[in-house]
Image (tube, rainbow, N blue to C red):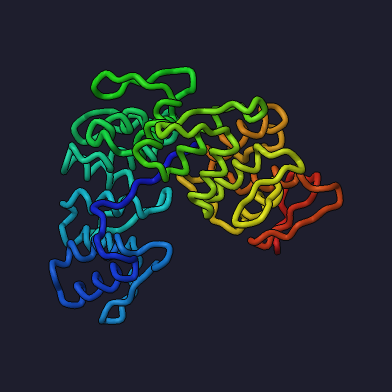
Amino acid sequence: TNKQTNKPSPTATASTPMDQVQLAVMAVDEGEALGHVYNCLGLALGDRFPSAMLADGTVVNRKEAYLRSANYFAVNEPAVLYNLASSLSPGETVTLADGRVVDGKWLCIEAIHLQRDLGQPYCQLGNLLRRGESIQLKDGRVMSDRDLFCESIRCDPVDAISYNNLASVTDPREKVTLPGHRRMTKKQLLLEAIRLDPYSSSAYRQLAFMLSAEEDETVRLHDSRVMSARQLLLHAASLAPGMSRNLVALALVLGPEETVEFRGSPHRARDLLVAAFFEEFDTFWPLAAAPIDHAANIAHLGERAALCIATEGNDLRAFTLCALSRRLGPNERIVLADGSVAVGGVQRVEDKS
């Protein structure tokens, strides 16, 4: 439920995102090694610069740049295939130059087939599997998401994302065996992810949910910081304030009138839940086949467990509406950033239309 997407490979080297975009566009226009240049253009594009215009007037986004690169290399460059896979939404497909329609899973499997010791495609493929699902690789290996994350760690033992994602599919009471016969608990995996990448908001968030907020339980990090669940979640939100899951998770550990300092002002739980609607509710998989009864899950399992179920079912937005409704007065209504209305005491959303 807390899988983290991988970073593109290889990394761009220009000093700012705008420098990267300009250099890549210039190189495309000059016809330099087009396969690599389109890949670099895809690396440079992102949230700040989602698209770029080439000299012929064509506008390309990240996915289209990677697709051009993949086609230039005749689908034989594993890092490019991985980058293209990481740019696709859950269930999304692309059409290759030869007419084949492929999805992210196919692209990762092909990248692994081309370079078996490249870790990132294993991790990305693990992201694309649902809990309990397995997939067969071209060499005959049948692997679950856990197997894929372990194999990614074997290929790249210092990849923090693989440790984070392996923790997301590990039960708190069990130990997982890593390459080299290392055995680690979920908590140890998360601590290792934070050690390797101190800016991993997902690892802080997962670690926080292993602690008891009510008993003020704490954990010691590799750099000797001692943090409670609330401190971990506040730190996660400060690292990635645009990630809705961080804001929702932080809200769940606050009492009705408790506040935390966020973005320069005090925020109650309801304020954080409202703020989440100004951000994108990030997804990994298509929506769950059947609607999730968030109110019933909260009543029977508590909000933390219900949040995990909502995230697994890709229904975080509806869960956030339900959690916000519980914190509003009986006649209170709040218009949210997406135009919907949260109604106090009502476990549903009123659409703008």
- Number of labels in the image equals 0
Residue 289 visible within the image: no
Judge from the rendering whether residue 298 lies leftward or rightward of residue 123; answer left or right: right
Tell me where residue 152 appears, x and y as whole percent. Answer: 28, 35
Residue 231 visible within the image: yes
Quick one: which residue is furthest to the left in this view?
A: 33
Q: Which residue appears at 33% of the width and 66% of the height?
A: 16
Q: Which residue appears at 58% of the width and 45% of the height?
A: 316
Q: Quadrant of residue 160?
A: top left
Relative to 76, say whether 300 is above or below.
above
Tell me where residue 109 appears, x and y as whole percent. Answer: 25, 41
Judge from the rendering whether residue 26 lies leftward or rightward of residue 336; answer left or right: left
Q: Quadrant of residue 333?
A: bottom right
From the viewer's side, name the closer residue of 66 and 24: 24
Relative to 9, say whether 127 is above or below.
above
Judge from the rendering whether residue 144 lies leftward or rightward of residue 119; answer left or right: right
From the viewer's side, name the closer residue of 303 and 187: 187
Q: Quadrant of residue 110?
A: top left
Q: Which residue appears at 83% of the width and 53% of the height?
A: 332
Q: Which residue appears at 19% of the width and 54% of the height?
A: 75
The quadrant of the picture occupied by the C terminus is bottom right
Judge from the rendering whether residue 251 lies leftward or rightward of residue 194; answer left or right: right
Tell me where residue 350 appears, x and y as whole percent. Answer: 73, 55
Relative to 294, say whether 32 is above or below.
below
